[in-house]
Amino acid sequence: MPTSREYARWRNRMVDEQLVKRGINDRRVVDAMRVMPRHQFVPEEFKAQAYEDRPLPIGEGQTISQPYMVAFMTERLRLKPHHTVLEIGTGSGYQTAILCHLTHYVYSVERVTRLADHAGERIGDLGYNNLDIHVGDGSQGLPDQAAFDRIMVTAAAPWLPNVLCSQLSKHGGQMILPIGDEHLQELTLITRRGERFTSRTLLRCRFVPLIGRFGFDSDINSQPNIF
């Protein structure tokens, strides 16, 4: 079993070689990735691989995203300490903990109860209490808690869920999410100002599918584009 010193060394190397050298330069994001113990968010058999630049299985057909993708999505949202954030797809809780570290409050939605419970325990053990995890259909967001300064979707949507767009703050609210089919998507940044929405494609990616009413489990065949 690796020691805490070994984990710290691997984590610093991950940040220096996988993140900083590849263009992640937001100091707050870099610092958060440097202190967050990713090995505590993966199953025992994968702890020694926790700081490699790749996703890892966490059970229930889900994965923890590669460190670079976590840092990239987090940086692109330009998070501020006063922001309230909605995360769709709690998963292991690693990305959730990064959001908790950087913002005022985080609401996270996870459809698998076991994952939600374990993530909540891990994040609580790290001392974060600015979090509310809901079990349910993340594709519908949390309209009762809206509006959100930022929304992060960590599962692939077949189209842009208008219901999530409507939950963004009208004053420069932003959402980042992968959009595409179940095999390949484009990571997309949505910005809202009043009733106007703009979209920017960032890079190609591959995420597990978003399951729910407005995801791949939907019986809705199409949605109108919000733009």
Image: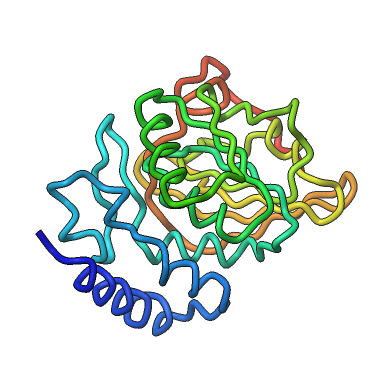
Number of numbered discs on residues: 0
Task: Say left or right for 41 vs 191.
Answer: left
Up-down relation of residue 138 to residue 25 (above or below): above
Up-down relation of residue 205 to residue 164 (above or below): below
Outermost right residue: 194
Give the image location of residue 31, x and y in percent.
49, 74
Along the line of sight, which residue is nearer the eye, 83 or 139?
Answer: 83
Q: Residue at x 24, y 73 (%)?
A: 10
Along the line of sight, which residue is nearer the eye, 151 or 81?
Answer: 81
Give the image location of residue 112, x and y in percent.
40, 25
Indicate how the structure is coloured in the image. rainbow
Q: Quadrant of residue 209?
A: top left
Outermost left residue: 1
Task: Say left or right for 22 vs 1.
Answer: right
Q: Residue at x 64, y 31 (%)?
A: 141
Q: Quadrant of the C terminus?
A: top right
Outermost top residue: 219
Task: Say left or right for 119 vs 153.
Answer: left
Up-down relation of residue 184 to residue 101 (above or below): above
Q: Quadrant of the N terminus?
A: bottom left
Q: Residue at x 34, y 43 (%)?
A: 183
Give the image location of residue 49, x and y in percent.
18, 60
Q: Residue at x 41, y 46 (%)?
A: 125
Up-down relation of residue 171 to residue 22 (above or below): above
Task: Say left or right for 192 vs 176.
Answer: right
Q: Quadrant of residue 166?
A: top right
Give the image location of residue 211, x and y in percent.
45, 27
